[in-house]
């Protein structure tokens, strides 16, 4: 019945001119064709499509059958008639109006979600490529529309993270990336071959569309993609192969990556296409950072870089990209920033990175980004690596650079553990200065005293939360103890003895007061907790205790007592170091007059 109905519609349309086809004819043809497919009359439908007499009708109306055919291929994977569906799809692509087909295929690609996204893309990429190559006008626009649609759908797929996920490729992203490269190659080759003998304007438009696609691909999936170890065969990593091809495309269409990464961010833009010029700072930052990572860390096409570039110059332009990575919250992204920083720092000798580099914004924001990873990242290995990179960065700076960075981080980190780490580094630099044959003005004398003002003080005086700041306070006391032991009052290389009275008033005395207040508070809390413990045990309820204005989370009384005793132990530890520092000061100040008497 459906076949007869379709043939009736075709016979009526055969006597009409192409321009006389009505919208009603298109609708009736689509419904009848759909019914033929639903009822399994595939072979008869194929005969109608292949009939030369129906050529004009199929050219104008046949694209309406592509959707039903594609859905059959997706849903009926075990159907014996799949070969007829494939044959019908090939015929429709060959015979139908390419403009209508293009829009129909892109609509089909936009329909699915989840795992069906990759299935339909893999199915339609070849037909889509064939259709675009048949277009005579506005090919660049069509290529751009197709690539944009494909990228939008692929960006919805999860990027595989582990080696196992890459190999299983559950959502088909890796397969799609490989197929997408094959889809794009003919258009890249067209740009290469038509550089001298094609319509220049159309060729430039095609280059622009390909360039946009490459940058989108660098951002997704390559920005978040994880790559297999380079020791393994590169051919086994589909995402690495995709990255390599994208970088190759850039060079092929006249945008070699060395030119782009060296000029990115300069006042004079390198893009001829206005959209890139306007959107560079907003949209290209992620793509450029991804490109820098692929080249310098993964080593893709790194042989194209000039060999004369100094390590400090390479670090300088990569710092902006590292900053972009560290501003992101995804672990797979900011970890690349840490890797890229390591790659740059390992090329530089210790103490050779000039302090003038810190005048560049990224040279201060990058270590601040590392601090955020160190303190907020839930993954221990990344926290430890960020700490190691911060130490490596400090090691590379010259003395004035170290001094400047220490001041910056002491003012901005707002984390007791980080501040303790910086104070320990200050102590190390003072030690090197005191042992060195030449005087380092940045960690002795007035410059050091200015730095110690940020170290030997309590942020809120005696009311400072000593428990929260315990790491910093212990590091500060240890530094002060070191200075008292190593620097004699007579020599006063560090300037400590000149400023001792101020240090006592601003740091030691408030610390004494704060310790007494804190210990009294926690001892009272312990007493209250012990008095209430019997009642709590009878009721078998959890209890809560308020410490420092904040309530300790509900927990068994035994656990709360452990927490409170642990705090008291911390205060006792601080107090013992404080007592030792004051004892050493007293010994040194008494011995100095005696030495003077002996000299006389």
Image (spheres, grey):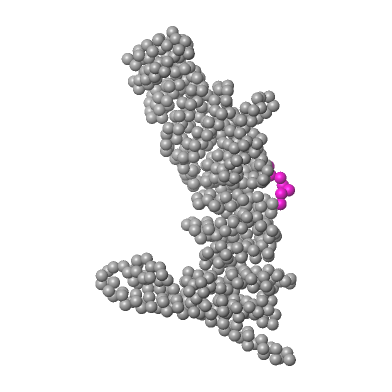
Residue 487 seen from this side: no
Q: Residue at x 43, y 8 (%)?
A: 15
Residue that protrudes farthest toward the left in the picture: 538
Q: Nearer the viewer, residue 264 or 169?
A: 264
Q: In the rendered view, does 98 fall on the left or right side of 78?
A: right
Q: Position of residue 6 (x, y in %)?
A: 37, 14
Q: Residue at x 44, y 14 (%)?
A: 21
Q: Nearer the viewer, residue 338 or 522?
A: 522
Q: Position of residue 317 (x, y in %)?
A: 65, 50
Vertical arrangement, residue 85 with respect to residue 594, above or below:
above
> Is residue 302 one of those drawn in magenta?
no
Vertical arrangement, residue 539 with respect to residue 501, above or below:
above
Magenta part of the chain: 304-310
Quadrant holding the C terminus: bottom right
Residue 256 seen from this side: yes
Q: Position of residue 76 (x, y in %)?
A: 38, 28
Q: Quadrant of residue 72?
A: top left
Vertical arrangement, residue 17 with respect to residue 264, above or below:
above
Q: Residue at x 66, y 52 (%)?
A: 316
Quadrant holding the N terminus: top left
Q: Residue at x 66, y 40 (%)?
A: 270
> Is residue 305 one of those drawn in magenta?
yes
Magenta span: chief secondary structure: loop
């Amino acid at each position: 019945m459906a076949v007869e109905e379709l043939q009736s519609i075709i016979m009526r349309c055969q006597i009409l001119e192409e321009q006389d086809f009505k919208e009603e004819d298109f609708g009736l043809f689509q419904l009848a064709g759909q019914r033929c497919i639903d009822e399994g009359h595939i072979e008869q439908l194929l005969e109608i499509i292949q009939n030369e007499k129906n050529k004009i009708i199929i050219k104008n109306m046949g694209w309406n059958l592509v959707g039903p055919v594609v859905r059959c291929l997706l849903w009926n994977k075990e159907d014996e008639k799949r070969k007829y569906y494939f044959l019908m799809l090939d015929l429709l692509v060959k015979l139908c109006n390419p403009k209508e087909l293009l829009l129909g295929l892109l609509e089909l690609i936009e329909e699915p979600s989840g795992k069906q996204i990759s299935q339909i893309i893999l199915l339609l990429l070849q037909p889509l490529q064939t259709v675009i190559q048949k277009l005579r006008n506005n090919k660049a626009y069509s290529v751009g529309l197709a690539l944009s649609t494909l990228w939008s759908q692929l960006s919805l797929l999860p990027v595989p993270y582990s080696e196992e996920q890459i190999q299983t490729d559950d959502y088909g992203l890796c397969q799609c990336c490989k197929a997408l490269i094959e889809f794009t190659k003919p258009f890249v080759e067209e740009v290469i071959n038509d550089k001298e003998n094609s319509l220049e304007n159309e060729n430039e438009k095609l280059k622009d569309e390909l360039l946009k696609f490459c940058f989108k691909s660098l951002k997704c999936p390559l920005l978040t993609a994880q790559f297999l170890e380079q020791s393994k065969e590169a051919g086994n990593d589909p995402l690495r192969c995709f990255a390599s091809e994208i970088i190759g495309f850039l060079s092929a269409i006249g945008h070699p990556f060395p030119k782009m990464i060296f000029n990115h961010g300069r006042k004079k833009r390198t893009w001829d296409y206005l959209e890139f010029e306007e959107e560079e700072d907003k949209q290209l930052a992620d793509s450029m950072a991804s490109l820098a990572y692929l080249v310098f860390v993964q080593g893709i096409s790194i042989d194209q870089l000039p060999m004369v570039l100094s390590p400090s110059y390479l670090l300088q332009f990569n710092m902006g990209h590292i900053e972009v990575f560290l501003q992101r919250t995804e672990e797979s992204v900011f970890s690349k920033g840490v890797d890229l920083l390591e790659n740059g720092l390992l090329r530089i000798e210790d103490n050779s990175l000039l302090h003038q580099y810190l005048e560049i914004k990224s040279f201060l924001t990058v270590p601040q980004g590392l601090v955020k990873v160190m303190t907020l990242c839930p993954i221990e290995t990344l926290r430890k690596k960020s700490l190691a990179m911060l130490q490596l960065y400090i090691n590379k700076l010259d003395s004035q650079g170290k001094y400047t960075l220490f001041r910056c981080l002491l003012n901005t980190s707002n984390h007791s553990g980080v501040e303790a780490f910086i104070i320990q580094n200050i102590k190390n630099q003072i030690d090197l200065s005191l042992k060195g044959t030449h005087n380092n003005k940045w960690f002795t004398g007035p410059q050091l005293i200015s730095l110690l003002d940020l170290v030997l003080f309590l942020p809120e005086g005696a009311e400072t939360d000593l428990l929260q700041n315990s790491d910093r306070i212990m590091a500060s006391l240890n530094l002060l103890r070191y200075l008292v032991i190593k620097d004699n009052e007579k020599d006063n290389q560090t300037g400590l003895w000149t400023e001792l009275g101020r240090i006592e008033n601003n740091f030691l005395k408030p610390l004494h007061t704060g310790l007494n207040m804190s210990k009294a508070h926690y001892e009272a809390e312990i007493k209250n907790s012990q008095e209430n413990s019997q009642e709590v045990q009878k009721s078998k309820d959890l209890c809560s205790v308020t410490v420092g204005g904040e309530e300790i989370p509900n927990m068994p009384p035994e656990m709360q007592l452990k927490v409170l005793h642990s705090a008291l132990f911390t205060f006792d530890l601080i107090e013992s170091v404080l007592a030792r520092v004051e004892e050493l000061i007293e010994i040194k100040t008494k011995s100095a007059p005696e030495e003077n008497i002996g000299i006389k």
